[in-house]
Amino acid sequence: MDNTFVVIQGIGKLGLEKQPIPELGPNDVLIRISKVGLCGSDLSMVYKGRLADQLVSQPTGVGHEASGTIVKCGPAVKKLKSGDRVAIEPGGPCRKCDLCVSGKYNICNIASFHNNGMLYPGCLGHYYVHNADLCFKLPDNVSDEEGALIEPLAVTIHASRKSGVKLGSSVLICGAGPIGLLSLLTAKAMGATNILVTDIKENRLKTATKMGANHTLLVDDSDPKNLAKRVEELMGCMPEITLECSGSQSAISLGIYATKSGGVLMAVGVGPTEMTLPITHALVREVEIKGVYRYINCYPLAIDMIAKGLIDVGPLITHSFKFEDFQKAFEMFHTGEDGAIKCMICM
């Protein structure tokens, strides 16, 4: 049996490739992919040829926000069976290095996803072979579309946990793209009571308001110091925590100036390799600047929060496409045409 999947063939160039499905290892499962969400990192790989400071080699696969149904299991798989619907945690930690053993498997230096930032083949294809331990069964009341959004939701859960969001927290979220909006939902679910969301697009701020933001701020190229004052005016305080979800230099600068002394600036978005930032302003006020990469054991909680109605990810999905229309999906997501926030490809 063959698998047809999408590959990156060059800058802005996507195509299809067909390969035989490999033999399953003892702990592997074969998954018939159902839904795949497009991510900002997918766009960077396709249209910039890089992911942060890692260059994309061609051809390479694409797509890592995915759900599907298991059609075959390796002989050592015990907790899953054919017919189970699952959310896929992409990548593959070695499970042997000091980082993995200490629980920080997301930054394993040998992990397939971390080492080159890419998957080959990716999840944007008809079938995908993966380690069963990194596949999580979906309850009946969690749809395939919601299952595909477990991956980005896990990112925001890890970021909110690491930054210390708790009951009563005041939170600034820079960027109202998919990760910013999921950060909004996650922060609210974890108890934040005063949340301001910024973005450069008014339509995304309207979505943020509908999803529960207490305040929104349309930002431009203004002095980040002045924008920080505006944030304080709107929130009635300086936020204790900033979740920077855009990866832009100006937004990180805004976060540094806006965050309360002794607070936390969590860099969630992936931006340029090098930036010029007002670091001294953060240091003298003991604003902790932290980074986050993917997630650590967050999938079960992400699934549970959706299953119990604590988080509704549905409003993020603005457009759905058939597999054969993958090129159109990428182009719409890239341009933001028609208010695209999360484009879902249906297999």
Image (cartoon, rainbow, N blue to C red):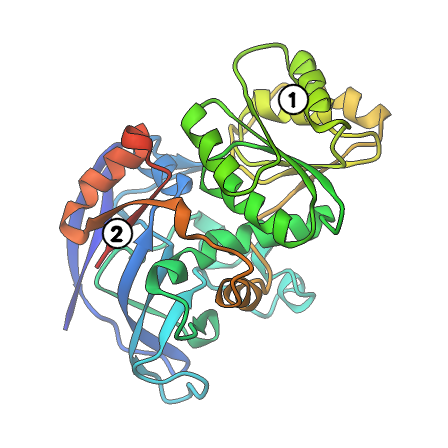
| Residue 188 drawn at (x, y percent) | 63, 48
At x 74%, y 49%, the residue is: 164
Q: Amino acid at mark 2?
A: Ile
At x 78%, y 20%, the residue is: 281
Q: Is there a contact, CB below 8 Å, between mark 2 and mark 1?
A: no
User: Disc 1 on helix, strand or loop?
Assistant: helix
On-image quarter of the C terminus:
bottom left
| Residue 219 drawn at (x, y percent) | 54, 18
- Residue placed most toward the observer, 34 or 7: 34
Measured in 3D between alpha carbons, the distance from the residue under mark 2 to the one under mark 1, in whole angstroms, is 35 Å
Q: Name the residue tied to disc 1.
A: 253
| Residue 276 drawn at (x, y percent) | 63, 18
Is residue 122 among the parts visible in the rendering? Answer: no
Question: Residue 283, relative to residue 109: is it above or below?
Answer: above
Question: Residue 20, relative to residue 50: is it above or below?
Answer: below
Q: Amino acid at mark 1?
A: Ser
Within 10 Å of disc 1 (Cα), the crowding (few <14, some 14-19, many 20+) is many
Q: Name the residue tied to disc 2.
A: 345
On-image quarter of the N terminus:
bottom left
Q: Which mark is residue 200?
A: none
At x 27%, y 55%, the residue is: 124
| Residue 199 drawn at (x, y percent) | 51, 26
